[in-house]
Structures are given as C-alpha cells and as structure tokens.
Amino acid sequence: MTRTHFSILTLLALSVVALAAFAEQKTPETAAVATATVGQTAPDFTLIDANGKSHSLSSFKGKFVVLEWVNFDCPFVRKHYNSGNMPRLQKEMMEKGVVWLGICSSASGKQGYFEGKELTERLKSEGFSANAYLIDNDGKVGRMYGAKTTPHMYIISPEGTLIYAGAIDDKPTTKLDDVKGASNYVVAALQAAMGGKEIATKSTVSYGCSVKY
C-alpha cells in the first residue's frame, strides 16, 4: 500500500467516525421535531398552566383539541387578540365541546414570557378564554410539535390523531381589518371534522413571529 493510499483510507475512516459522532450529538429536541405529523398520533405531553395545574394531552382523549402557540407581544398575535378574533374563537369552540389550549414556548426572559401576577393580569387584559394557558419555557413541547411561529395552530381528533397543522388563516398580515375577510383554516377544519367530513386543507405554512425558544 502506497503512502497516498494509506492517507486516503485514513481520511475516510476519520470521516466515518466524525459523522457517527455528529449523529450521536443530535439533541433529543432535534430528533423529536419530526414526531408531530399530520395523519399520525399526536405526541403526548404534560405541562403546567398559569395556575400551576398540570395538564396532559392524553387526558383529553375523546375530544377535539386545539393547540395555539402564543406570544402576546408578537404583532401577528396582537392582530388576533386586538380584534377579538382569538378569544371569540376560543369561546365558540369551547361551547361546542372543543378543548382549546394556549401554549407559550418563549424561554424565560424572552419576548412573550410572563409568570406569576404579571401573567395572570396579562391573560385577563387579553381576554384569553381558552381552557388553559400552558407554560413550555424550555421549549420541549414546541420543538416536539415543530412550532415555528406565533400563532401556530394544531388540531387533534378525539382519537388522538393530528388532523391539522399550520396557520390560523390565509391572511399573513398584522392588519386587524384582514381578520374579517380571511378564510380561517382552523374553523374550516374543525367544522369538517366535527361534521364527519374530510378536511380540505390539513396542512398550511404558519405565519407570524418566530417562537422565542
């Protein structure tokens, strides 16, 4: 074996070792991003709400569940709260038996993260009307679902299958006036699924501010 051949074989061996090491260094969060897939079982999770109460997704089996990623200081979220659109949807769907969970994946100290009295007052002033506001400040659940923006919406069937993921509607703007003329993907998907019909649009590209992991 020539010295050149030996060098090439050595480089190839080192490359294999390096690739294996890289694969081993993938974080659990990175590997978990792909676990939430439309058409498959929604990954379970347990989070604490603003009142310190624990909620597990699996405990809502038998009901439709909406997950809303939220950051109250994001202009795109502001559109849906300043217009009253999001609190109205929360109330309307909950009256129909849907469980609506807000999830904040903002890390402590970053935009959108609140705790204690400040969080309680903010939820009240925003008119937040969902079943619970869940705190995911380590971002594990957000990454598990691949939540990229606020808002980012997900719907889970009574059987536990993820049946919609994406934007709240088809108007990716911060203009309050655009709420009225928008086609709301979440409402359309819920109406179809609750009526036993096929959901026309099961996945869209979400819009908004990046989740502040």
Image (spheres, rainbow, N blue to C red):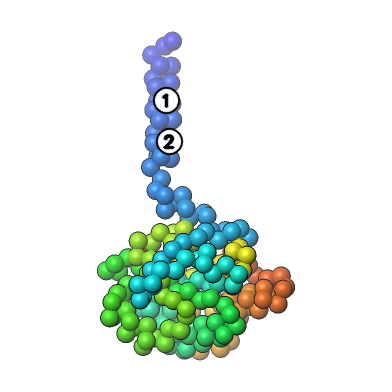
Give how far across and how far down residue 135 sits, in percent.
Answer: 37, 69
Viewer-closest of 150 and 178: 150
Residue denoted by label 2: 19
Check the image and report above or below for 181 versus 141. below
Specify whether 198 is left or right of 128.
Answer: right
What amino acid type is highlighted by mark number 1?
Answer: Ala
x 67%, y 73%: residue: 193
Q: Can residue 80 be seen in this view?
A: no
Which residue sits at x=46%, y=49%? 31
| The N terminus - image quarter | top left
Residue located farthest toward the right when viewing the structure as drawn: 197
Q: Looking at the image, can residue 36 be seen?
A: yes
Amino acid at circle 2: Leu
Q: Residue at x 52, y 55 (%)?
A: 35
Mark 2, secondary structure of its residue: helix
The x, y position of residue 102, in whole percent, is: 45, 74
- Secondary structure at numbered mark 1: helix
* Label 1 sits on residue: 13
25 vs 116: above or below? above
